[in-house]
Amino acid sequence: VQLQASGGGLVQAGGSLRLSCEASERISSYVMGWFRQAPGKEREFVAAMGWSGSRKYADSVKGRFTISRDNAKNTYLQMNSLKPEDTALYYCAAAGQWSRHYEAQSYDFWGQGTLVTVSS
């Protein structure tokens, strides 16, 4: 499956952005995840959502970010109360199973990334 992420941009601290991820086929059988990578840092888990509706978040974004999906082809990441430390390239990804949904190596398909920059 091919994934296309969009919606990144420049926003002031405290602002909001909504990222979108469009797949080339239906995603109803996939676990969908969002990861991010800041300059000079390793890629880290942000959020994941299973086909049954289960959601998990990194502690750093819990209460501020919300992952959702329409089980057709689209996955979203609503990001509120953004902080400068949220600045990163954000990737969407698809996995075949829920276990280890927080590990990048569990995901088989990746989008190209969309850049989020939060100014202070």
Image (cartoon, rainbow, N blue to C red):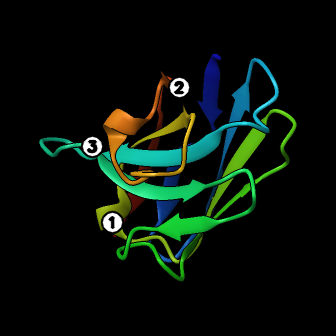
> Looking at the rendering, in which quadrant would you find the C terminus?
bottom left
Determine the residue positioned at 62% across, 24% down. 3
Residue nearer the viewer, 98 or 18:
98
Which labelled disc corresponds to residue 11? Answer: none
The reply to whether discs 1 and 3 touch (Cβ–Cβ < 8 Å) is no
Determine the residue positioned at 39% across, 51% down. 100
Instruction: Estimate the x, y position of residue 93 in percent, counting from the top left.
Output: 52, 35
Per the image, label 3 sits on a secondary structure element best described as: loop
Residue nearer the viewer, 54 or 38:
54
Q: Mark 3 or mark 2, which has the lower sequence index?
A: 3
Q: Residue under circle 2?
A: 111
Q: Dividing the picture into quarters, in which one does residue 2 lie?
A: top right
Asked whether, in this view, residue 2 is left or right of residue 109, the answer is: right
Instruction: Estimate the x, y position of residue 9 in percent, counting from the top left.
Output: 53, 45
Extreme-bottom residue of the structure: 63
Determine the residue positioned at 73% across, 36% down. 29
Crowd around label 3: few <14 · some 14–19 · many ≥20 (10 Å): some
> Looking at the rendering, in which quadrant would you find the N terminus?
top right
Instruction: Estimate the x, y position of residue 108 in percent, counting from the top left.
Output: 47, 25
Instruction: Evaluate whether residue 23 shows in this view.
Output: yes
Q: Mark 2 or mark 1, which has the lower sequence index?
A: 1
Residue nearer the viewer, 45 or 77:
45
Instruction: Estimate the x, y position of residue 20 in percent, counting from the top left.
Output: 69, 42
Instruction: Evaluate whether residue 7 shows in this view.
Output: no
Determine the residue positioned at 47% across, 66% down. 12
Q: Residue under circle 3?
A: 43
Look at label 1 and name its amino acid: Pro
Q: Mark 1 or mark 3, which has the lower sequence index?
A: 3
Asked whether, in this view, residue 51 is left or right of residue 62, the answer is: right
Asked whether, in this view, residue 63 is left or right of residue 88, the answer is: right
Q: Residue under circle 1?
A: 84
Crowd around label 2: few <14 · some 14–19 · many ≥20 (10 Å): many
